[in-house]
Image (cartoon, rainbow, N blue to C red):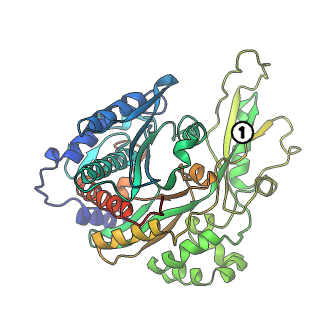
Amino acid sequence: MTAILYATLVRRTHIEDDDTDYASMPSVIDLQGLVRIDTTADRGSELEGARYLAGLLAAEGIEAEIEELPGGKANLFAVLDGRSPELLVLHSHLDTDPIHRPDAWVEDPFGGTLRGPFIYGRGVFDMKSTTIAQLHAFVAAHHRAREEGPPARSLALLATSSEETDSLLGTQRVLEQRPAFSERIWVVLTEGGVVEALDWDAIKHWGTSFAQKRYAPVRYYGPRREELEQLREALRTGAIGRRHGPPRWNAAAATFLESYRHTRQHPDIREPLGDLEALLADPALFERQPDFIKALFRNELHGFEVRPAAPASAGSEPRGEAWVLPLLLHLPPGATLEQAVAELLPTEQETPRLRREIEPPIGSGEASPVDHPAFVAIQEQIRATHGDVPRGPFFLAFYANDCRFFRAASKVCYGFQPFLLPGSDSATTAGPDERIALRGYVQGVELYVELVERLLALPAPPK
């Protein structure tokens, strides 16, 4: 029954008669070209992706700067100066997830294939579609400035390196190495928003991310795979350590749920969210909530597969540790690493033969304000495009984006999703046959162009 309902919803939403000639649309052609360039984090060339984007800009008379980095990595910059030096930054990342299971793909991962109502390819959802939407918004602003004069604020197109790993060569490098650029930042728009929809005309919630958890990597090393597999299983079952800590108040999560709870259809979810203090004080009631809701309020431990340890670097002492178990500590705003370690990890006495490494979480767990003029403008643009649909802030609980680095530099950053898409599209991210619906993509590009025009028209402070 669930499968039938799911198939029905997808068919109602996207598998429909649509005689639109998507193949001739510039935004689709541009996306196909970018998807056909392998920019996967493990083997691809970000530099070729940056050169492709620079070529699209050059065709419109726009000069872009490419910072070439070792290993085919790259960052791309383009700036349109306005009457104020304050920058609205349209940020994306050039790299994509690797092709983990090539044999499971039906479509060519680098084909940009149009089949039925979808476009397929690695990175088409995360996040080359948004990259092209941002590029079209930047080009539209450039042409408007030629005709009408400079906008109130300046605009930057920024596509960065290595987001799928650590952003060390990307956003972190830009903020550290380019102070003149970073000091000008007013607001950053990047990935991270969500759209929940049952149909084109049945949007449950259009969320713009304003806060997220932080992530602290933990690694256990040992000479025998079996011992690390046993530790992984013990952590999974809670035989030692804990998978999650007790719930604690989180102001950013409360801000998110204030609007989000009204969009929940089931009263057993919607009603408890109306009194968060009571919910957090009632362990049984809290445990009945969806994992996503519970994740907002507690430290959590998430494990990965045991894998071979990287060989010792030249000149370092070999340790004889052939295997590693990687873990992540998820910390909500306000939580400390010391607190999460004490709550979730086994003591060193419980794992005496294993070596443990803990890295501090990078970036900031602080939230960006939801009363900021830019956030308000985003909500107004959604309403102008899609009507008075449920919309508001969104909290990232299970994954991170580069907003954490911008916020650590005291910059306002929001994750905005411009595309009205079925959940089946986002489910393909990082997996075989990654895809997005063409109708939602094309409309989303138009929305992004209009949003950037709206944001650039907001009054800027005097020089």
Which residue appears at 71% of the width and 25% of the height?
322
Considering every residue shown, the one lying at the far front of the view is: 463
Along the line of sight, which residue is nearer the eye, 83 or 32? Answer: 83
* Quadrant for the N terminus in the image: bottom left
Q: Mark 1 packing: few (<14 Cα in 10 Å), some, or many (20+)?
A: some
251 vs 144: above or below: below
Q: Residue furthest right?
A: 349
Nearest the viewer among 229 and 431 is 431
Q: Estimate the x, y position of residue 2 in percent, counting from the top left.
A: 37, 66
> Can you give x and y, in whole percent of width and height, for residue 313 in the image?
70, 20
74 lies above or below 88:
above
Quarter holding residue 98: top left
Residue 396 appears in the figure: no
The quarter of the displayed image where residue 193 is located? bottom left
Residue marked by disc 1 = 219
Asked which secondary structure carries label 1, the reply is strand
| Image position of 36 with respect to 116: above or below | above
Left or right relative to 169: residue 194: left
Q: Residue at x 67, y 44 (%)?
A: 327
Residue 395 % position (x, y): 54, 64
Q: Residue at x 49, y 69 (%)?
A: 393
Q: Residue 302: image x %, image y %? A: 64, 51
Residue 280 or 9: which is nearer the viewer?
280
> What amino acid type is highlighted by mark number 1?
Arg
Across the whole image, how many numbered discs are drawn on residues? 1
Answer whether residue 274 is visible to the viewer in this image: yes
Q: Quadrant of the rendered structure where residue 105 is?
A: top left
As displayed, is residue 388 above or below residue 250?
Answer: below
